[in-house]
Image (cartoon, rainbow, N blue to C red):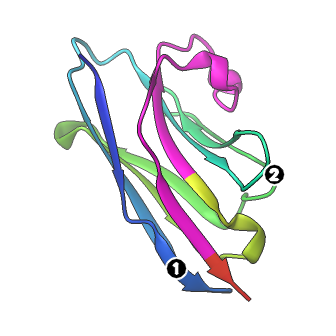
Amino acid sequence: QVRLVESGGGSVQSGGSLRLSCAASGFTDRQYSMGWFRQPPGKEREGVAGIHTDGRTIYADSVKGRFTISQDSAKNMLYLQMNSLKPEDTAMYYCAAGRSKWWWLLLLPHEYNYWGQGTQVTVSS
């Protein structure tokens, strides 16, 4: 049973930084791509960043240059470094895992089979 547990969320002022972590367990092989999604209050879930099994990454235009996705495969950890945070980054952030075939699809929720419970990020102006 795949399990994803996010941590690292919190409240920060505009311009600040946070680092989200996702602890993954239960994988039977290393063929899972990983992604970060977020859901602002009253809005739909949106893709933030994804990392394919081949190492290629993709970012939403709204976070390019500010957020960095990375992973430590040996520790089964996924990270999202978030810098220059803005109030519009306020959302529940989710970690996800799936056997996506193509890296350019990693911002699409349907590419993922497993989801964490989320961690809240609040950015105040």
30 up-or-down from 119: above or below: above
Residue 17 x %, y %? 53, 79
> Position of 107 compared to 24: left or right?
right
Q: Is residue 96 above or below residue 105?
A: below
Which residue was labeled with disc 2?
Answer: 61
Amino acid type at circle 2 is Asp
In which quadrant is the N terminus drawn?
top left
- The type of residue carrying mark 1 is Ser
Q: Residue 33 placed where, x, y %? A: 46, 25
Position of 57 with respect to 75 (left or right) is right
Closer to the eye: label 1 or 2: 1
Q: Earlier in the sequence, mark 1 or mark 2?
A: 1
Q: Residue lying furthest front in this view? A: 42
Q: Which mark is residue 29?
A: none
Q: Position of residue 71 (x, y in %)?
A: 36, 45
- Between residue 41 and residue 62, name the one nearer to us: 41
Label 2 neighbour load within 10 Å: few <14, some 14-19, many 20+: few
Looking at the rendering, the stretch of residues picked out in magenta corresponds to 93-122
Residue 11: give its label.
1
Secondary structure of the residue carrying tag 2 is loop
Which residue occupies 28% across, 21% down?
2
Give the residue at x 66% y 76%. 85
Residue 111 sits above or below residue 88 on the image = above
| Side of 48 where 17 appears, left or right | left
